[in-house]
Every structure is written in structure tokens, then in C-alpha cells.
Image (tube, rainbow, N blue to C red):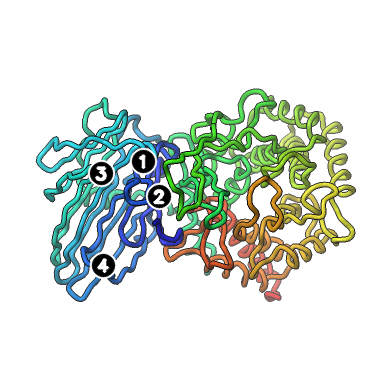
């Protein structure tokens, strides 16, 4: 059975990523891209579905772990009365992380593991179970060099190089070894296509030094966020690790089918790029000083949405591909039994009107930050199409349960026209301003008249509903209404009363199924950070800080957050690590710092 989600740490090279458990087992890795088939899928099943474990032979060692400062290099220490070793895990980036240089096409990807003796002697074991294509293909293993074992299955090939004499038995590569104080044993697993030459060998220690330098060089741009700098820096490293370096696209998470409810069926593939994340990502990166990463992301976005505005999708593959056919993999039993396991995502075909607002907001924010002029013809085409369809119902931000007039969707349609107007006015762009302003006002009036429920004293999930939805917390954040508006304040109060569980915010009332799936899920962490932002805007700084610190405290021991948190089980749930959660953390930290700085400049104090 897979470990608790919070027991995993992330390593990656900005093209793919792996999850390493506390016990030294790599239980998830898709090669060569985030969305490729997994060669280690024990996360969604058992060790027989693929894993690579290096750990002490004797069970029950003391385990401590941490990332090397300002890097994605993971170090795990195993100690027993007989001895202690460290296991260092990383995936060397295939190109510098700073600047616009892209990885060399066809360059091999390597997972490096270095075991070093720190005290006494410790008997260790290595077990490598490779299963390509989500555990469907058992590869054929041969010894190709004295210290190199090649595994081939269809187009996939890996080569394991280590000084140890490991054996292949029953389609597993395994062996025991003893590490004494001062000794180092390295393992390098390289991926390549089976019809090409063997990947070139690399020196593990040289790769370690270079990898640390690359991450630290990239993080030099990071702006300080006071006492929350550690959490922000770890979040930014995580976001960079979830970036597909060749295109600039950022996946929502490197995993698929980690359940939103333990044992449940709300299991989705998040290894794609959502347009919804665009504005928050852009602002988080720019606020933190990472303009090249923000530029890469916005350029990916422009390429992805290019074409007919009628064909815009809510998500795309990391290189902009549109066909994300959803399939179930019945041979995988799922994370701790949560089925089905899905790859692809059928939500890519939904109509979600909010994406037009998010795209236009990126155009606007990017231009304000000096990213240059954007495609005005594309902007005009998007707005012309939105003018035709904004009155239609859509699927909304969360729910797979039929179309409604969702409040958040209409608010973001308003954002699309609002940002286009601001772009034109601030940068002297010729545009049909009178028409856009009329539509903007029409949408604003429509939302205010139809989305606010006087009985609840709150904006609701969709027109005429009695359901609260945390997405409306974004209304003041995007400028639809000021935080001082009584309707906003009463909405925030209603969400605090009815959607908060153990001090955390649920997306909506999940006790009643609305999408054909069993009800129930964890508290959505991004929504809880949005609540922090609302508290800041209302001047409730002490409350905002308490909630922010509580949310940061939900990260695991190496600073990573999942999509959700189960208040009953006290566990992280959902795909992991989740970009949206870390983006929200970064933005809330900057909002808090700005608020505190403003108070200091006025000679005030935190209320």
C-alpha cells in the first residue's frame, strides 16, 4: 500500500518529476515528460506496479529528511544503533534554469541516488522494479556493460549504472550492500528511447554540485517576504519544478488520481496546464521577481489559445496539445484503493467562461509589467466571441454536473472586458471602448441582480441557487466589487459560517452530490488562502496572519502542499504537490507583506 500523501517529497528537472517516500522508495515517475506513461506506479497500487527503493535492510530506522538549502535536492538520513547513512536524491536539470535556453533535444534524463556512510556500518538494500506504461509493460533486462543494466520495453529504455553487482531475478533488479562511514555508493538511472544509443554515463557527484548551483542561481531573483520567506521560497521552487522547461507550461500537479476523498472516486489527472491558474501564476512569479518564468508562462498561454476563439479550452497539455482523452486504467488498484485510476481529463471539453477573463487578465498584467505588446487581433477575436456567449450557462469552475449560470464564470467574463478596457486606456490602443464598457456594465448588473441571495446575504454558486461557493471570494480580488461593499462583507461572513470546517474553507457544500459522484472531499487549500486575502483586504490582519500560518503548517515536513486537506483524517488529499496551493500561498504572503508595509509607513499597527 502506498504511503500517506504527506510522506512524499518531490524531485524533478523541470521536464518530469518523481515522488520519493520517507522510506527511500520512489513510487511515482513518468518518463520522459510529466504526462508520459509511468515507469514507477506503486503510488497507485503496490510495489509490483513499479518502484525503486534504497533503504536499510533492517526495518524501523530513525528517518529524517530535508532539502538542501534553496534546491530540489532531497536528503534522507537513516540511522540505527549500528550506523547512519544519508540518501541524496535528485534529477539533474537538462538545461540551465535561468534565461531562455531550452534543453537539448533528445538529451537523456537521469535519476541520481547517492548513499553516503556517516557513522558505523549499515546494511542496505536496493530493489528496482521497472514497469513501463503505467505498469502494463514488464521490460526485458540485460547486462550491457560491467556495471550497467539495460531495461527495454517497447519504445522505453532505462540504463542503471552503479558500482554494485546487482542481480536481475523475477524481473526485478536487486541486491544488498554495506556502507561504512566515509564510503559513497552512487546509482544513476538514465532514460532514453529504445531505438537510440545508450544514454551517456554521468558522474553522480559532479551532477549533484551542478544541480545545486542551477537551483540556487535561479532562486537568486526571489524577493524577500519577511518571516514567511522559507515557505515562499519552497513554494517557488516547487512551482519551477512543475514547469515544463521546453515550453514554459506549468502542470497543476505531477500526479494523477490521488483522491480528493480517501477511498473515493474523485480521482483526476492533473498533469496538464489549466488556464485558470494563469493570472495567479503570473502575478505570483512577477511579485516574487521571476520575470523570465512569467514570460515563459504567458508565451505558452498565447500559443495554447491561438486559433479560433470558439475552440478555446480550459486546459491543455504541457506543449499546448488539445486532445486530452480521459481513460481508466483498471489494472491499477488506485491510491490506497481509491478507484478508478484515470489518465487524460474529460473536463478539457467543458465550456467554462471564466477562462476568457483569466486570459485577458494575463494580457493586461503582462503588459503592465513590461512584457511587450500582445496579439491585439487575438484579443479582439476573444472578446467578440465572449460578447456572443457570456449570457449562456456553462459548467463552472468546479462541478461536472451540467450547465448553470455560475457566478464566478460571469464575474470573470466581466474581468475580460474590464482588462481589455484598461489595456486600451492605459496604453493608447485603439479599441471599441464604448461597446466594451456597455457589455462590462451589463454583466456587472446581471451578476448583482441575479447572483446575490438576500436570505443568505451572500453571492451564491449560480443564479437562483442556495449553495455557497468559495470561488466568489475572488470577486474583490479581481476588482469586481470592493472589499468594503456590504454584499462582499456579508458573503465572506456567510462562507465563514457555513463553508469553514476546522478553520479551513471547503469549495462548496459537498454533502450533497451535484455531479453524479459520491459526495465529500477535503478543504480546498487555495480557497483558504483566498479567505486570507479577503481578511487582508478587510483590514483584519491578525486573523489573516493566524490563518496563513495555520495553512503553512499543513505542509509536510519538506514544505509541500496537496490540493486539499481532510480535517477529519488530518491528512493531505488530492494530487500532490499542487501548483494552485503553492501559487495561492505565494500571493497571500505578498498581500500580507504589502499590508504590513503600508501600515508601517502610515505609522500604524496591525489591528
Residue at image coords 64%, 40%: 362
The numbered mark, 2 or 3, whose residue comes first in the sequence reads 2
User: Residue 45 shows which numbered tag?
Assistant: 2
Left or right relative to 523: residue 269: left
Q: Position of residue 597 (x, y in %)?
A: 64, 67
Q: Quadrant of residue 595?
A: bottom right
The numbered mark, 4 or 3, whose residue comes first in the sequence reads 4
Q: Which residue is mark 3?
A: 189
SS at circle 2: loop
Classify the position of the N terminus by image quarter. Answer: bottom left
Q: CA distance from mark 4 to mark 3?
A: 25 Å
Q: CA distance from mark 2 to mark 1?
A: 9 Å
SS at circle 1: helix
Is there CB contact under 8 Å for labels 4 and 1? no
SS at circle 4: loop
Classify the position of the C terminus by image quarter. Answer: bottom right
Left or right relative to 555: residue 522: right
Q: CA distance from mark 1 to mark 3?
A: 18 Å
Q: CA distance from mark 4 to mark 1?
A: 27 Å
Look at discs 4 and 2 and give the one toward the viewer. 2
Q: Which residue is mark 1?
A: 135
Residue at image coords 47%, 53%: 337
Q: Which residue is mark 4?
A: 59
Q: Is residue 12 visible?
A: no
Q: Quadrant of residue 419?
A: top right
Is there CB contact under 8 Å for labels 2 and 1? yes
Q: Position of residue 187 (x, y in %)?
A: 21, 49
Residue at the farthest left position: 146
Look at discs 4 and 3 and give the one toward the viewer. 4
* Mark 3 surroundings: few (<14), some (14-19) or many (≥20) residues within 10 A: many
Amino acid at each position: 500500500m502506498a504511503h500517506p500523501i504527506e510522506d512524499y517529497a518531490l524531485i524533478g528537472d523541470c521536464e518530469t518529476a518523481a515522488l520519493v517516500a520517507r522510506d527511500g522508495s520512489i513510487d511515482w515517475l513518468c518518463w520522459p515528460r510529466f504526462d508520459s506513461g509511468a515507469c514507477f506506479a506503486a503510488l497507485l497500487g503496490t510495489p509490483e506496479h513499479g518502484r525503486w527503493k534504497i533503504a536499510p535492510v533492517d526495518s524501523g530506522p530513525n528517518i529524517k529528511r530535508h532539502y538542501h538549502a534553496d534546491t530540489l535536492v532531497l536528503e534522507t538520513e537513516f540511522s540505527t544503533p549500528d550506523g547512519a547513512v544519508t540518501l541524496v536524491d535528485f534529477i539533474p536539470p537538462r538545461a540551465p534554469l535561468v534565461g531562455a535556453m531550452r534543453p537539448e533535444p533528445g538529451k537523456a534524463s537521469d535519476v541520481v541516488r547517492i548513499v553516503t556512510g556517516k557513522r558505523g556500518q549499515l546494511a542496505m538494500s536496493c530493489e528496482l522494479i521497472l514497469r513501463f506504461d503505467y505498469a502494463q509493460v514488464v521490460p526485458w533486462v540485460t547486462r550491457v556493460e560491467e556495471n550497467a543494466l539495460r531495461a527495454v520495453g517497447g519504445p522505453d529504455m532505462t540504463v542503471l549504472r552503479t558500482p554494485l553487482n546487482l542481480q536481475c531475478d523475477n524481473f526485478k533488479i536487486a541486491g544488498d550492500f554495506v556502507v561504512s562511514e566515509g564510503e559513497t555508493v552512487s546509482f544513476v538511472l538514465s532514460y532514453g528511447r529504445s531505438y537510440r544509443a545508450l544514454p551517456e554515463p554521468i558522474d553522480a557527484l559532479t551532477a549533484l554540485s551542478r544541480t545545486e548551483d542551477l537551483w540556487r542561481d535561479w532562486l537568486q531573483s526571489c524577493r524577500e517576504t519577511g518571516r514567511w520567506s522559507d515557505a515562499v521560497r519552497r513554494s517557488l521552487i516547487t512551482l519551477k519544478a512543475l514547469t515544463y522547461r521546453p515550453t514554459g507550461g506549468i502542470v497543476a500537479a505531477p500526479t494523477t488520481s490521488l483522491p480528493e476523498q480517501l477511498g473515493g472516486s474523485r480521482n483526476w489527472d492533473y498533469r496538464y496546464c489549466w488556464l485558470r491558474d494563469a493570472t495567479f501564476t503570473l502575478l505570483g512569479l512577477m511579485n516574487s521577481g521571476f520575470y523570465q518564468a512569467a514570460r515563459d508562462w504567458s508565451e505558452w498561454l498565447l500559443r495554447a489559445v491561438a486559433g479560433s476563439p470558439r475552440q478555446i479550452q480550459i486546459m491543455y497539455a504541457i506543449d499546448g496539445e488539445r486532445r486530452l482523452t480521459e481513460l481508466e486504467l483498471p489494472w491499477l488498484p488506485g491510491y490506497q484503493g481509491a478507484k478508478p485510476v484515470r489518465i487524460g481529463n474529460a473536463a478539457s471539453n467543458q465550456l467554462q467562461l471564466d477562462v476568457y477573463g483569466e486570459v485577458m487578465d494575463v494580457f493586461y498584467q503582462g503588459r503592465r509589467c513590461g512584457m511587450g505588446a500582445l496579439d491585439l487581433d487575438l484579443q479582439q477575436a476573444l472578446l467578440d466571441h465572449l460578447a456572443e456567449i457570456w449570457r449562456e450557462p456553462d459548467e463552472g469552475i468546479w462541478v461536472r454536473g451540467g450547465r448553470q449560470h455560475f457566478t464566478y464564470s460571469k464575474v470573470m467574463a466581466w474581468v475580460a472586458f474590464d482588462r481589455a478596457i484598461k489595456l486600451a486606456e492605459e496604453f493608447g490602443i485603439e479599441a471599441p471602448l464604448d461597446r466594451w464598457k456597455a457589455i462590462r456594465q451589463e454583466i456587472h448588473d446581471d451578476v448583482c441582480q441575479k447572483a446575490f441571495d438576500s436570505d443568505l446575504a451572500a453571492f451564491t454558486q449560480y443564479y437562483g441557487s442556495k449553495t455557497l461557493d468559495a470561488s466568489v471570494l475572488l470577486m474583490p480580488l479581481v476588482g469586481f466589487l470592493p472589499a468594503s461593499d456590504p454584499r462582499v462583507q456579508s458573503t465572506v461572513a456567510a462562507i465563514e459560517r457555513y463553508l469553514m470546517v476546522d478553520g479551513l474553507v471547503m469549495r462548496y457544500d459537498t454533502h450533497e452530490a451535484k455531479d453524479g459522484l459520491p459526495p465529500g472531499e477535503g478543504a480546498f487549500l487555495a480557497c483558504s488562502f483566498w479567505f486570507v486575502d479577503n481578511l487582508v483586504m478587510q483590514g483584519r490582519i491578525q486573523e489573516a496572519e493566524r490563518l496563513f500560518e495555520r495553512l503553512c503548517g499543513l505542509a509536510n515536513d519538506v514544505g509541500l502542499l496537496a490540493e486539499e486537506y481532510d480535517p477529519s483524517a488530518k491528512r493531505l488529499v488530492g494530487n500532490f504537490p499542487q501548483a494552485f496551493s503553492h501559487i495561492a500561498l505565494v500571493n497571500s504572503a505578498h498581500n500580507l507583506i504589502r499590508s504590513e508595509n503600508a501600515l508601517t509607513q502610515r505609522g500604524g499597527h496591525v489591528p
